[in-house]
Amino acid sequence: MRVTWELRGSRLFLYLSGELDHHAAHQALVEVGAALDEHMPMHCVLDLSGLTFMDSSGIAVVLGTYRRLKSYGGELSLTRAPNHAAKVLTMAGVDKIVPIASVARP
Amino acid sequence: MNVQNQMKMEFLSRSANEALARSAVSQLAAQLDPTLEELGDIKTSVSEAVTNAVVHAYPDKLGMVHLRARLLEGGVLEVTVRDKGVGIEDVDQARAPLYTTGGEERSGMGFTIMESFMDKLAVRSVPGRGTTVVMRKRVMPRLLR
């Protein structure tokens, strides 16, 4: 599991890659939190295209990121979720809270 | 039901073993020639069941998690995850969507995902004795797709 980020104007892009499971979730939340604390972006884009696996731990990571941003008025969107990650997130209704922009792979 | 193939493994309830468990089952399930989506459903469900055992079965210590996967007649995969941990007092409550005792890194969606991604899910638990989760999924033969 890797978390990298890139600041583009006022938008912070966060890239999650590898396998996002319970084993990886704690570290992912810590790293995402550190990037958010450092930049306090008004808009954050979570790019999931590098994920090779995601279970319900991903729901907790997305919602944790959402709550952190919301605490100071920031917004979150999701992009390029692989099909399976999108299926897990949609099943949990996460797409009703955080817009899922597009899907990475057909 | 005739067993066509079977594997068993056991491992300590360390979170690093979640990936080991789902990879092993995925390798066995691949013999049924599943689609990528079916394989994803299987890996996710195994991950959820094993994570439950890792997080909840043995609070404050490590214990063994037992995994069995079988290929049954008719292209059916059966996965059993068993622990001898603390058990679940109220299985119906544990299975309810969003119910969790696992803190902010958990979503409470584990059982809901297993139910939705597999065809059958059975949960047996005896407080103080442990929990057994059995899941089945039929992989559609290519010709019928």
Image: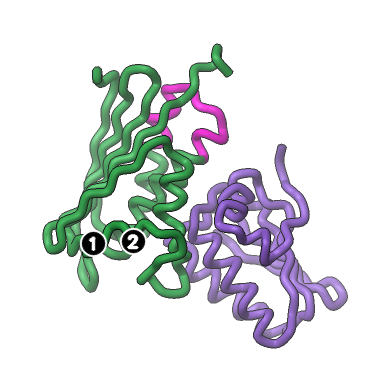
Chain colours: A purple, B green
Q: Give the range drawn in magenta.
A: B25-40
Q: In this view, does B8 lie to the left or right of A81?
A: left
Quick one: label 1, few (<14), some, or many (20+) residues within 10 Å? many
Q: Which residue is drawn at 32% across and 33% down?
A: B78
The amino acid type, in three-letter code, at marker 2 is Ala
The image shows residue A86 at horizontal and vertical percentages of: 63, 50
Q: Residue at x 15, y 57 (%)?
A: B126
The image shows residue A89 at horizontal and vertical percentages of: 59, 55
- Name the residue tied to disc 1: B88
Q: In which quarter of the image is the N terminus of chain B?
A: top left
Q: Residue at x 43, y 22 (%)?
A: B32
- Name the residue tied to disc 2: B94
> Spatial distance from mark 1 to mark 2, Cα to Cα?
8 Å
- Dot 2 falls on a residue whose secondary structure is helix
Report if residue B36 lies within the magenta region. Answer: yes
Q: Which residue is drawn at 68% across and 81% down?
A: A70
Name the residue at the left extreme: B129
- Dot 1 falls on a residue whose secondary structure is loop
Same subunit: marks 1 and 2: yes
Q: In the rendered structure, find residue B99 and report the number of the disc placed on it.
A: none
**Quarter of the rendering containing residue A14:** bottom right
Label 1: chain letter: B
